[in-house]
Image (tube, rainbow, N blue to C red):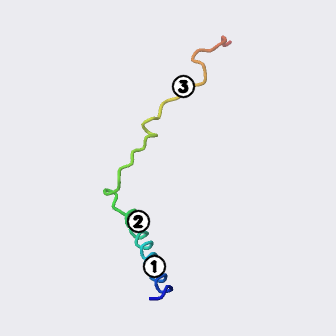
Amino acid sequence: MRVGQVIAVAVVLLALVVIATAVLALRDTERAPEQRPTVVRTDDMTWQRTPSPAPSSPSRPIG
C-alpha cells in the first residue's frame, strides 16, 4: 500500500470511531425515565423563610 492509501484508511477508521461514539452518546441520553439516574433537587430542601426586614414592634407610638 502507498502512504496515501494508509492515511486514507486511517482517516476512514477515525471517522467511524467518531460516528460510533456520537451514536452511542445520543442513544444513552434517550433512555426511558426509569433507567435515568435520579437527580435530587437540593434547592427545595434548603429553602428557609427569611426574616422580615420590618421591626416586630413599632419604634414610635402611632397616633
Q: Earlier in the sequence, mark 3 or mark 1?
A: 1
- Please state which of residues 41 and 51 is positioned toward the viewer in this rendering: 41
Residue drawn 35% across and 50% down? Answer: 38
Gap between marks 3 and 1 measured at Cα: 66 Å
- Please state which of residues 48 and 6 is positioned toward the viewer in this rendering: 6
Three-letter amino acid code of the residue under disc 3: Pro
Residue drawn 46% across and 76% down? Answer: 15
The location of residue 46, given as percent across then percent down, is 45, 35
**Quadrant into which the N terminus falls:** bottom left
Residue drawn 48% across and 88% down? Answer: 2
Q: Secondary structure at mark 3?
A: loop
Q: Which mark is residue 51?
A: 3
Q: Secondary structure at mark 1?
A: helix
- Please state which of residues 54 and 48 is positioned toward the viewer in this rendering: 48
Q: Earlier in the sequence, mark 1 or mark 2?
A: 1
Three-letter amino acid code of the residue under disc 2: Ala
Q: Is residue 24 above or below residue 2?
A: above
Left or right: residue 51 versus residue 18 is right
Residue wearing tag 1? 10
Residue wearing tag 2? 25
Between label 1 and label 2, give the one nearer the viewer: 1
The location of residue 57, given as percent across then percent down, is 59, 15
